[in-house]
Image (cartoon, helix red, strand yellow):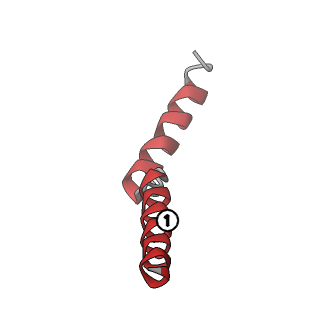
Amino acid sequence: LIIAFAIFLAVKAINRMKRVEEAKPPTPPAPSKEEILLGEIRDLLKKQSGGL
C-alpha cells in the first residue's frame, strides 16, 4: 500500500511537470535575413520621405 502511494505521488509529479512545460509559450522564431533586409529598406524609405 505504501509503495502504491509512492508511485501515485511520482506519477502525479511527472504529470504536473509535463503540464508546466506545455503551458510555456513557444519562443517566436528569429527574423530571417529577408525580414531583416525588408526592415532596413522600410527604415531607409521612411528617412527619405521625411518620417511620415
Identify the residue shown where x is 52% and y is 44%: 40
Q: Secondary structure at mark 1?
A: helix
Classed neighbour count for the residue bearing mark 1: other residues with Cα under 10 Å, few (<14), some (14–19), many (≥20): few
- Extreme top residue here? 52
Residue identified by numbered label 1: 17
Q: Residue at x 47, y 74 (%)?
A: 5
Q: Residue at x 50, y 78 (%)?
A: 6
As drawn, which residue projects farthest toward the bottom?
3
Q: Is residue 5 above or below residue 49?
A: below
Quadrant in which residue 46 is drawn: top right
User: Which quarter of the rendered picture does the C terminus lie within?
Assistant: top right
Q: Position of residue 29 (x, y in %)?
A: 42, 56
Q: Residue at x 46, y 51 (%)?
A: 23
Q: Residue 20 location in percent, x, y?
A: 50, 57
Three-letter code for the amino acid on which mark 1 is drawn: Met
Q: Nearer the viewer, residue 4 or 17?
A: 4
Task: Tell me where residue 51 sits by quadrant.
Answer: top right
> Along the line of sight, which residue is nearer the eye, 50 or 21?
21
